[in-house]
Image (tube, grey):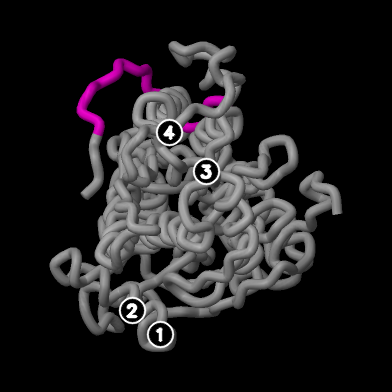
């Protein structure tokens, strides 16, 4: 079972776009502490994995699913005797979707709890704050949230691995299925790192296709009211509206777009279509919306690994099915534990080498970490939300429009990211 931190810290809530440099400045240990040599580990044999994630805030539903799946990855390894006879423990911490809080929690996990590695974070900027701490301490970090920046040379380190899809991969796959040459495209974008990176990805994909951008409107993180944006978007008369936001922002924006009649004028597209947000507002609101995904439980009918993953999750969670972002918790922790098995323990350099050479298949098919930037090369799903009458059961939310197999060609080149080739 995971270990939850109960001590509370008073932190000012702010959008996840807080810069990573500002985040670490507030640490009680100070910036100088980050330059200290790698800490010795505790004397006991337990393998400890730190898991910061936003258990409170607008991304809480996705975060709690990630914890459940991370727990499952740990349980399955422990049921088989652990790693070289050592049991694995998951230490879950609430980063409150705040970069400063995440950096503080991560430093505590390293200094106080003596974790051997860190997995987690559910925001582009928050994961960069976690990475700032882990790379300074020589601790492996497996990120499980979308980001393009974390793979770029300025933020990368030998200890940094990115298990999630990235905006470049996701938007390209979605654009290929929804945007055609000559179309007009408008964008409603959350004004922080996630939204900006998705917008950049969509615009790059549009340019390759030959579509035209007719307008971009930014909205605040955590917005509840989108009514002032909708008339402006409708006046642009696009063929496609790309809504690039996450968590409850996605549900609120799509619901209000539907209330304004936008679906009668244009196709609604999202870079990442979220299982939990679709459940939150129902099939009528999301009907016909298309978006990308790392995972969908419905793959079980065509993929043996997905069927096995679903079966194990159902057995551990009262028959429930795993969600898209939840699956990242399983594959992020699971790939790390496979590398530790291959390395015969927790020696950092040996585990890094094992991760770089790892060929793994945990939820949906083959994956591997590209050596130059440690991005996980994997398939990208494109899903369309079903209308209520087409649903076979309450979990039958989406139709699979496309399943693009993983390939290095899906990624920006190593040289573009600033890595030596």
* Of the pair 283 and 68, the residue shown nearer to us: 68
Of all residues shown, which one is farthest toward the left? Answer: 318
Would residue 265 be visible to someone looking at this image? no
- Identify the image quadrant of residue 308: bottom left
Is mark 1 in CB contact (under 8 Å) with mark 4?
Answer: no
**On-image quarter of the C terminus:** bottom right
Residue mark closest to the camera, 1 vs 4: 4
How far apart are the two marked residues, 1 and 4, measured between alpha carbons?
38 Å
Per the rendered image, the range of residues in magenta is: 5-19
Disc 1 versus disc 3: distance between alpha carbons?
29 Å
Query: Horizontal placement of 50 versus 75: left or right?
Result: right
Q: Residues within 10 Å of mark 1 (few under 14, many from 20)?
A: some
Tally of marks: 4
Question: Which residue is drawn at the image coordinates 32% and 39% (left, top)?
Answer: 44
Residue 283 drawn at (x, y percent): 29, 68
Q: Are marks 2 and 3 in contact (CB under 8 Å)?
A: no
Counting residues from the start of the chain, the first of labels 1 and 3 encountered is 3
Q: Secondary structure at mark 4?
A: loop
| Residue ID for mark 4 | 41
**In-image side of 216 versus 142 (left or right):** right
For mark 2, give the secondary structure.
helix
Q: Which residue is mark 3?
A: 141
Q: Do tag 3 and tag 4 residues touch (Cβ < 8 Å)?
A: no
Q: CA distance from mark 2 to mark 1?
A: 6 Å
Asked whether 94 or 123 is in front, the reply is: 94
Residue at numbered disc 1: 304
State the residue position of label 2: 308
Q: Is residue 31 left or right of residue 95?
A: right
Q: Are marks 2 and 1 in contact (CB under 8 Å)?
A: yes
Q: Earlier in the sequence, mark 3 or mark 4?
A: 4
Q: Earlier in the sequence, mark 2 or mark 3?
A: 3
């Amino acid at each position: 079972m995971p270990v939850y931190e109960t001590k509370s810290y008073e932190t000012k809530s702010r959008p996840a776009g807080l810069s990573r440099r500002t985040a670490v400045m507030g640490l009680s240990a100070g910036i100088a502490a980050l330059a200290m040599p790698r800490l010795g580990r505790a004397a006991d044999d337990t393998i400890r994995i730190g898991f910061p994630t936003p258990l409170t805030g607008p991304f809480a539903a996705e975060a709690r699913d990630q914890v459940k799946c991370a727990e499952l990855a740990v349980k399955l390894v422990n049921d088989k005797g652990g790693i070289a006879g050592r049991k694995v423990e998951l230490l879950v911490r609430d980063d409150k979707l705040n970069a400063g809080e995440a950096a503080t929690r991560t430093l505590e996990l390293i200094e106080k709890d003596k974790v051997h590695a860190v997995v987690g974070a559910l925001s582009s900027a928050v994961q960069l704050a976690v990475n700032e701490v882990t790379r300074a301490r020589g601790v492996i970090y497996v990120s499980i949230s979308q980001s393009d920046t974390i793979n770029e040379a300025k933020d990368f380190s030998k200890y940094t691995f990115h298990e999630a899809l990235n905006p470049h991969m996701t938007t390209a796959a979605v654009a290929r299925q929804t945007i055609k040459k000559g179309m007009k495209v408008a964008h409603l974008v959350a004004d922080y790192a996630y939204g900006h990176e998705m917008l950049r990805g969509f615009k790059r994909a549009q340019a390759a296709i030959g579509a035209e951008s007719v307008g971009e409107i930014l909205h605040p993180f955590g917005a509840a009211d989108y009514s002032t944006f909708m008339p402006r978007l409708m006046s642009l008369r696009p063929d496609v509206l790309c809504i690039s936001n996450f968590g409850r922002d996605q549900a609120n924006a799509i619901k209000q777009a539907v209330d304004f009649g936008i679906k009668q004028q244009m196709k609604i597209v999202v870079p990442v279509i979220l299982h939990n947000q679709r459940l939150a507002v129902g099939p009528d609101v999301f009907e016909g919306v298309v978006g990308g995904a790392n995972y969908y439980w419905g793959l079980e009918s065509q993929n043996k690994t997905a069927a096995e993953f679903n079966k194990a999750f159902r057995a551990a969670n009262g028959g429930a099915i795993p969600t898209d972002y939840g699956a990242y918790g399983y594959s992020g922790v699971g790939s790390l534990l496979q590398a530790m098995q291959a390395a015969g323990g927790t020696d950092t350099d040996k585990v890094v080498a094992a991760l770089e050479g790892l060929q793994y298949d945990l939820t949906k098919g083959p994956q591997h970490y590209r050596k130059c930037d440690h991005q996980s090369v994997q398939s990208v799903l494109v899903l369309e939300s079903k209308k209520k009458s087409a649903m076979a059961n309450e979990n039958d939310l989406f139709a699979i429009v496309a399943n693009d197999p993983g390939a290095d060609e899906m990624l920006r080149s190593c040289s573009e990211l600033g890595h030596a080739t």
